[in-house]
Image (cartoon, grey):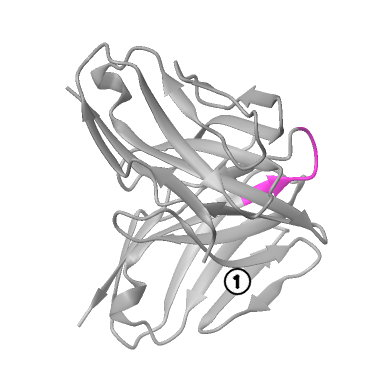
Amino acid sequence: GESVGLHLPTLSVQEGDNSIINCAYSNSASDYFIWYKQESGKGPQFIIDIRSNMDKRQGQRVTVLLNKTVKHLSLQIAATQPGDSAVYFCAERSNQGAQKLVFGQGTRLTINP
Amino acid sequence: EADIYQTPRYLVIGTGKKITLECSQTMGHDKMYWYQQDPGMELHLIHYSYGVNSTEKGDLSSESTVSRIRTEHFPLTLESARPSHTSQYLCASSEYSGGKETQYFGPGTRLLVL
């Protein structure tokens, strides 16, 4: 069945450093992936997405990498800032069946001053 | 910013009460969703709708019910609240375009059942 999971539940980095958040997925039929950021007391907020016909996509200070061979997704955040502290979720969408989003467990990113 | 709203933001209620959590979106999205989430944990889909008069149960069994009489409105009802229903409830809507389907979330309703 479908499953999306994160390798690490927590990650602490120094302000200004780069951070990498990883995600593994198991459904080879997934063709669309999204990273969400959820700050305390708020709903998840869209960060960046990638379709399966790409292996890299860049946004402002964020990069998503997709490795379909090993079913791995990562989110890189450059020059982290205190405002980056949040829980980050990856989500996958299958091109088959009900085509719902499946969310991973979440990684809590803490930025140390 | 997504135009999706949830009320109330916080609710404390006694066991056995009937409650309705409201969700509205002004983006004209056909698809809407309800998720249950414990703090810092993953999101569990409990209901979704692909349009007016369409409702489906999600992956997580829930004692709640939903209705979709209007495109912009997707309320969730608990007929008899229990302490096990204590959680955060997130509403989302989505649009499909160019092979992508992005879900936009509301701020959530944090429910505490005593």
Q: Quadrant of the N terminus of chain A?
A: top right
Residue B30 within the magenta-colored segment of the rendering: no
Q: Is B7 displayed left or right of B23 in the figure?
A: left
Q: x%, y% of residue B105? A: 50, 52
Of all residues, the one furthest to the left in this rendering is B114
Task: Give the vertical position of B38 relative to A5 (above or below).
Answer: above
Pick the residue in front: A6 or B3.
B3
Number of residues whose C-alpha sits closer than 10 Å to that of mark 1, classed few (under 14), some (14–19) or many (20 or more): many
Q: Can residue B77 be seen in this view?
A: yes
Q: x%, y% of residue B19? A: 35, 23
Q: x%, y% of residue B103? A: 60, 52
Which of the 4 image quadrants contains residue B49? Answer: top right
Q: Mark 1 points at which residue?
A: A64
Which of the 4 image quadrants contains residue B97? Answer: bottom right
Q: Residue at x 60, y 71 (%)?
A: A64
Task: Give the vertical position of B111 relative to A86 (above or below).
Answer: above
Which of the 4 image quadrants contains residue B77? Answer: top left
Q: Can residue A103 be seen in this view?
A: no
Q: At numbered mark 1, what does the secondary structure look like: helix, strand or loop? A: strand
Q: Residue at x 50, y 25 (%)?
A: B60
Pick the residue in front: A73 or B25.
B25
Residue A96 within the magenta-colored segment of the rendering: yes
Tell me the amino acid under the disc marked 1: Val
Q: Residue at x 71, y 25 (%)?
A: B53
Q: Is A73 displayed left or right of A19 in the figure?
A: right
Q: Quadrant of the C terminus of chain A?
A: bottom left
Q: Residue at x 59, y 61 (%)?
A: A73
The magenta segment is: A92-97
Q: Is A69 displayed left or right of A9 in the figure?
A: right
Task: Give the vertical position of B53 relative to B31 (above or below).
Answer: above
